[in-house]
C-alpha cells in the first residue's frame, strides 16, 4: 500500500467508526476521531463545533443500539496533500439519503487520522 491508499483507508475506517452506535453514544470514543478544530455543516444547515457535536452526538440519530443505523455506500477518497484526505459518500438512515463530504487530517504528536470538517446534504426524494 502507498500513502494515498493507506490514508484513504484509515479515513473510511474512521467514518465507519463514527457511525457505530457505541462510538456515537460515547463522548470519549468520538473525541478520538474528531479533530479539536472540527466543524460540521449538518444536513439541516446547522453549523456544529467540536464541543457542540460531542455534546449532542449521544442523542442524535444512529446513537441507539436498538435504533436505526446508518447505511453507508459509494465511498471515494483522495489524498489531497500529505496528512489530508477528502472523502465523499452517501448514507441512508430510516429511508433518508444524504450525500456526505469530509476532510480527515493527520497531525500532532499522536499522528492519528481525525475528522477535521464534515458536510451533509440531503438527497431530494426524486434522487437527483
Image (cartoon, grey):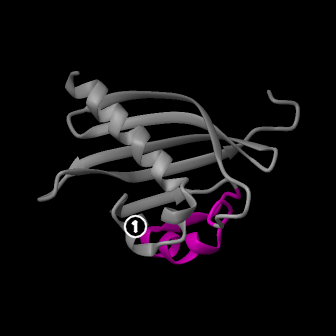
Question: Does 50 lie within the magenta span?
Answer: yes
Residue 86 lies, in percent from the top left, at 40, 35
Q: Which residue is drawn at 73% across and 56% down?
A: 68
Query: Residue 54: x and y, percent?
Result: 48, 72
Question: Is 60 one of the magenta-colored residues?
Answer: yes
Side of 70 relative to 32 (left or right): right
How packed mark 1 is, by other alpha carbons closer than 10 Å (few <14, some 14-19, many 20 or more), is some
Which residue in the rendered view is the most extreme toward the right? Answer: 126
Residue at horizontal 51%, vertical 74%?
52
Q: What element carries label 1?
A: helix
- Location of the C terminus by quadrant is top right
- Relative vertical location of residue 22 with respect to residue 14 in this rendering, above or below: below
85 versus 56 height, above or below: above
Q: Mark 1 points at which residue?
A: 29
Residue 110 location in percent, x, y? 15, 57
Q: Is residue 19 left or right of residue 90?
A: left
Magenta range is: 44-63
- The quarter of the displayed image where residue 6 is located: top left
Name the side, left or right, on which 105 lies relative to 42. left
Q: Residue at x 30, y 25 (%)?
A: 5
Amino acid at each position: 500500500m502507498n500513502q494515498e491508499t493507506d490514508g484513504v483507508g484509515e479515513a473510511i475506517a474512521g467514518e465507519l467508526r463514527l457511525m457505530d452506535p457505541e462510538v456515537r453514544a460515547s463522548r470519549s470514543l468520538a473525541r478520538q476521531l474528531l479533530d479539536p478544530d472540527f466543524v460540521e455543516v449538518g444536513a439541516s444547515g446547522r453549523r456544529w463545533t467540536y464541543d457542540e457535536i460531542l455534546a449532542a452526538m449521544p442523542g442524535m440519530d444512529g446513537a441507539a443500539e436498538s435504533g436505526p443505523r446508518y447505511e453507508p455506500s459509494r465511498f471515494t477518497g483522495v489524498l489531497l496533500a500529505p496528512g489530508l484526505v477528502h472523502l465523499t459518500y452517501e448514507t441512508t438512515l430510516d429511508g433518508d439519503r444524504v450525500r456526505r463530504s469530509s476532510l480527515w487530517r493527520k497531525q500532532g504528536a499522536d499522528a492519528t487520522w481525525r475528522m477535521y470538517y464534515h458536510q451533509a446534504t440531503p438527497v431530494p426524494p426524486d434522487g437527483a
